[in-house]
Amino acid sequence: MEKKGNLNANYLAYVAKIAPKTNEKKTLFHAFWVGGTICLIGQFIRYFLEFTFGMYGDELAGTTSVILIFIGSFLTGLGVYDRIGKFAGGGSIVPITGFANSVVSPAIEFKSEGFIYGLAAKMFVIAGPIIVFGVVGSVSVGLVYYIIGLFT
């Protein structure tokens, strides 16, 4: 019987042999310019809304976010965002459009299982933990600020 350490070493050697090689510089460059382009589009939308419709503050930020989420969801539905993700990697995941993609992709994949058990139940498979962590984190920070406010 082989030792567990030797078995792990054999497995890691096998994975290293069959795993595709990655060109880190090329991958980082694609992620940088695609993510930057998404942010540039968001900034353009923000300026457009500000100068055309006179929006400012929270109204401007919320509307810009909703438009970017719609664009990300729409491109996911067309299958375009997945191709962008394969090309750009993390550059397409970090902006808010990546969050929209993580919600819409499972919904599209499981729509054949029905509206309730497929579309509605699977929609937050990937994004659900992020939402829960964000809500719990924000409530925790809010409680800390509230307690600090009681003593000042």
Image (spheres, rainbow, N blue to C red):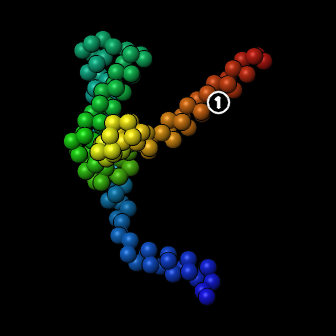
Check the image and name the residue furthest to the bottom: 1
Toward the viewer: 85 or 8?
8
The quadrant in which residue 58 appears is top left
Residue 92 x/y as whole percent: 34, 45
Q: On the rendered structure, is 58 left or right of 8?
A: left
The quadrant in which residue 9 appears is bottom right
Residue 16 x/y as whole percent: 43, 75
Residue 33 in view, yes or no: no
Residue 40 x/y as whole percent: 30, 35
Q: Which residue is mark 1?
A: 140
Check the image and name the residue furthest to the right: 151
The quadrant of the rendering that contains the C terminus is top right
Toward the viewer: 41 or 138?
138
Q: On the rendered structure, is 64 left or right of 143?
A: left
Q: Residue at x 27, y 41 (%)?
A: 76
Q: Secondary structure at mark 1?
A: helix
The quadrant in which residue 14 appears is bottom left
